Image: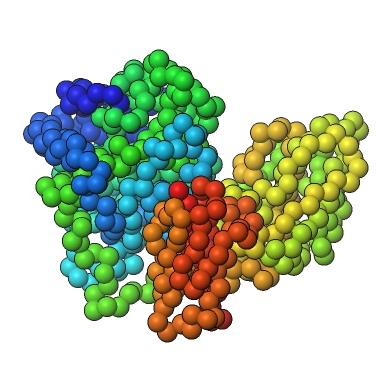
Amino acid sequence: MKKTIYAMALACLGLGATLTADAQTVRQCATMENLAAQVAADPALAQRISAIEGQTQQFVSKSAAKRTTAVITIPVVVHVLYNTSAQNISDAQIQSQIAVLNEDFSKTNADVSKTPAAFAGLAANPNIQFVLAKRTPTGAATTGIERKSTNKTSWGTNDAMKKASTGGLDAWDASKYLNLWVCNLSGGILGYAQFPGGAASTDGVVILTSAFGRGGSASAPFNLGRTATHEVGHWLNLRHIWGDASCGNDLVADTPTQQTSNYSCPSFPKVTCSNGPNGDMFMNYMDYVDDACMYMFSNGQSARMNALFAAGGARASLTTSDGGTAPGGTTPTPTPTPTTPTYCASKGNNTSYEWIDLVQLGSISRTSGANAGYYDGTASATTVTAGSSQTISYSAGYASSAYTEYWKVYIDYNQDGDFTDSGELVASRSSSSASTLTSTFTVPATAKTGATRLRIVMSDASATMSCNSYSYGETEDYTLTITGGAARQSGQTAEAAGYRVFPNPATDVLNIEVPAATNAATVSVKVYDLRGAEMKQITFDGNLLNIGHLAKGVYTLRITDGQQVSHQRFVKQ
């Protein structure tokens, strides 16, 4: 906002969250409600928050060149509380959430490219990373995940999940770890966080089980891990972008004043509070839009977060934490990651009038009648090669009259358990004919080798996506086996494989340092955009990758050296 008046921030402390959500169809965060309760119980908290705000404003007032830009890595412990087996989320689901945080807090999330041009120059890389803890506060080895079965069917926002004495799990040392509690929150709440300055015993973030992680067991429209991004933003001293008041103040200079929270996926521009022509920055992580429609922090927000780790900052102790380092230099063996991802449900509620009666792709060839809205054909598989062009055929069956049907074909190319990544919607069209339809698509060269999910959705509603139920139509799932793509063992990043890639983001040249044990003559580098198309205009001389001709955006490096294939995302500015 244009003015930074701390009195307005203190006024926010008296605001409670208005909880009117029906289930989890709109985002509801209880951070401000929790803060108001804490201030009522501990009046000295307001003074501590005031002192933190003073240090923050002093840091923000420095020129950008004088601020610290080193990457901050925060050890994370995830406390899973479950009453059912479904609530006992997998290690893979937890890892997916850590991956989302690392992308969003480094501006390497693929969807940052959707930021409107009016705000693109304000999208920031906060230089913050997260890693599951490798040692406990007592120095023992850990996976950074602890689990507890509980008789409680749901939890409120009174911090009971943060204490063993009230059935939860105690926080680890808040000066060394970010504590994340995952449990079944009640009241339509997706999550809440504790601002800096609160009690160490309750410090951290709480997330609803079905809103934690990307894909898998998470439920749309909060299945991309952005609830944790939003709440960790609060934990790092960010306010809601509307300031929790009509045309309020979020204590950030470069976020436009906006009237209130935004929901779902607004159209740009949405003008409120005389903030035209560009309107609300509703795609900001600190608004209330759906996961798929939030994809940026602003420079001002980044500065506020970075202030916490500067000298005198409220979370500076995290910069020297050894929680992310395994004791004795060994890393504990994690629980095996499931080899088959869990996919969201998709089903038509009524097939009395229309259904899928044909699907053909390679060796998959199935004709059928109605299948009660969903057919599991994953026992049927066909093989495709990365980089190849493929044609899929499909048609609708009708009981009598033909209706307009909306077809969508999805392939989970990166095998992460969802169909929301760029390029995974491979066909989309409408037709009111019973004739066979065809769509042609190209399998990205970066597609992951192995078996994955092919999903065909036919619905009478154009808004139907890859998940959830819909009124009329049918969904069918099959198995697609990809060969010649990214090797499974190359799921590691290039840097994890020993390469050093810098700077990231980059403008003209990207340095790629080859490991000493690797023969540089065997190294080849390719670059792909988010659609999986190869960028042939780049050149690599064995150390320097010339990217000056690339358009601004997010790209993927594919490095091969005869022994392994590795990948690394980078941002071209």
Residue at 81% x, 55% y is 391
**Residue 245, placed above or below residue 28:** above
Residue at 44% x, 19% y is 276
Q: Please tell me which residue lies in front, 422 or 62.
A: 62
Q: Give coordinates of residue 70: x percent, y percent.
A: 26, 56
Q: Does the image show residue 152? A: no
In this image, 396 relative to 264: left or right? right
Q: Please tell me which residue lies in front, 473 or 174.
A: 174
Quadrant including the N terminus: top left
Which quadrant of the view contains residue 240?
Answer: top left
Residue at 62% x, 47% y is 345
Residue at 31% x, 52% y is 128
Q: Give coordinates of residue 321: x percent, y percent.
A: 20, 62
**Colour theme:** rainbow
**Residue 395, placed above or below residue 448:** above
In this image, 223 relative to 157: left or right? right
Q: Please tell me which residue lies in front, 356 or 311.
A: 311
Q: Does the image show residue 524? A: yes
In this image, 523 relative to 457: left or right? left
Which quadrant of the view contains residue 527?
Answer: bottom right
Q: Give coordinates of residue 417: x percent, y percent.
A: 57, 56
